[in-house]
Image (spheres, rainbow, N blue to C red):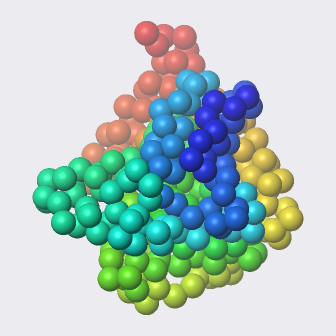
Amino acid sequence: MALLDKDGVRLTIDDTVATVTLTNPAKRNAQSPALWRALAEAGRSLPGTVRVVVLRGEGKSFSAGLDRQAFTPEGFEGEPSFLDLARGSDEDLDSTIAEYQEAFTWWRRNDIVSIAAVQGHAIGAGFQLALACDLRVVADDVQFAMRETSLGLVPDLAGTQPLTALVGYARALEICATGRFVHAEEAERLGLANLVVPADELDAAVRDLSAALLAPPRDAVIETKALLRAATSRPYDDQRTAERAAQARRLRDLAGLSD
């Protein structure tokens, strides 16, 4: 069942699994503000029964990043160009970027587990979209790169925190400042990829991982994800307290004593 199909984004639901597909392979799934709004809408449209969300791109590339048309004087039809945005007030520019970021923030919600299925190019905004997901299964032809600095910009689509958490500050700085490509073998070694498979096995690998994630009781996965997401920001003793509280909720639920 398709709940959404617009602006280069399609959302389909199959029982407890949702699939968000980037649908403009002719442009290597280049991104635009309209696409970002559609991605944010997809997040808002998820039924409460969904447990796993798969993000994929049609064609040979996951996403080649921001459509360069954004930097032309005319920009996209019906949209302010990035040059126009730069001439606006600080408040307007900040709120516009915050709106763009919404497309990249909902993937880590505690009630779902998100998987990016990444093949070919995942550059700039494409890399950040893959980083927005909890897990990444990648094809052996994958090419990650953070190219924003080569354009005189910074990664601003919520990708800097997950990148640093995955690979550490020094490696994240080097990847972003140089804009170099990270290929499949290195991506797996650095922790960017949970799994590397041949390109023709990507969909099957994602299906297998989805099935494994659906096997445990949903509430146990939700509680565990919440604990892990907060683990690096909480003091050790606070994390121990959170673990005890989560386990108490699970034990009471299993004993039929929850509200």
Residue depicted at 43% across the width and 26% down the height? 248
Q: Is residue 122 left or right of residue 81?
A: right
Residue depicted at 48% across the width and 72% down the height? 68
Q: Toward the viewer: 47 or 125? A: 125
Q: Toward the viewer: 210 or 103? A: 103
Task: From this view, report whether residue 81 is shown above or below residue 10.
Answer: below
Where is residue 155? Give x, y as percent: 37, 70
Quarter of the image containing the C terminus? Answer: top left
Which quadrant of the view contains residue 86? bottom left
Residue depicted at 70% across the width and 62% down the height? 25
Residue depicted at 64% across the width and 73% down the height? 121
Whether residue 151 can be seen here: yes
Task: From this view, report whether residue 234 is shown above or below residue 82.
Answer: above
Q: Is residue 119 left or right of residue 51?
A: right
Q: Toward the viewer: 190 or 98? A: 98
Where is residue 85? Give x, y as percent: 25, 62
Where is residue 2? Give x, y as percent: 69, 32
Residue that lies at the very extreme toward the right in this rendered image: 200
Quarter of the image containing the N terminus? Answer: top right
Task: From this view, report whether residue 206 is shown above or below residue 145.
Answer: above
Q: Is residue 235 left or right of residue 244?
A: left
Task: From this view, report whether residue 174 is shown above or below residue 166.
Answer: below
